Amino acid sequence: MESYKVHFLRLAREGRVEVPGVPVQGYPLTQEEDREKGGFYLVLEGELVIDLPQGRYLHLKRGEAARVTEPHRLVPVERVVLLELV
């Protein structure tokens, strides 16, 4: 396969983006989502609160990332574009 360039943020603003052979996806998050498994998230645009058990949370802004190892809820503060390791 040849090398190529992808404008990931622009494409992820419009919908889910997957890169063949790379375990990441990008997508806009417009509403809350519950997740049973952990994950790795990088905020490309906007702000995100990750609601954790026992009243804990992580507040991520553009350019910040988090690795989560427990069930959680993703809560967009405003329109969020995420890169997620899958």
Image: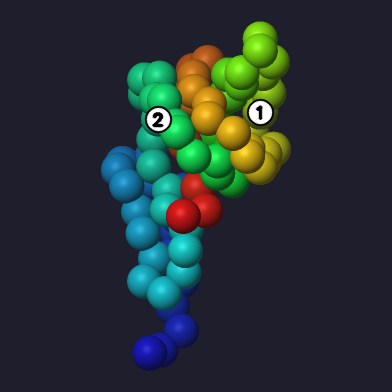
> Between 2 and 67, which is closer to the camera in this rendering?
67
SS type, badge 1: strand
Rendering coords of residue 52 (x, y %): 61, 21
- Distance, label 1 to label 2, CA atoms, is 14 Å
Q: Is residue 63 visible?
A: no
Q: Which mark is residue 24?
A: none
Pointer 2 local density, CA inside 10 Å: few below 14, some 14–19, many at least 20: many
Give me the residue at 53% from left, 30% from top.
71
Q: Is residue 20 left or right of residue 75?
A: left
The percent coordinates of residue 46 (x first, y second) are 55, 27
Q: Name the kind of residue labelled 1 in the image.
A: Lys
Residue labelled with disc 1: 61
Q: Are the residues tagged 1 and 2 within 8 Å (C-beta)?
A: no
Camera-side residue of 36 and 75: 36
Left/right placement of residue 17 relative to residue 49 reads: left
Looking at the image, is 78 positioned above or below residue 62? above
Residue 28 is situated, as x and y percent measured from the top left of the image, at 39, 35
Residue 29's disc is: 2
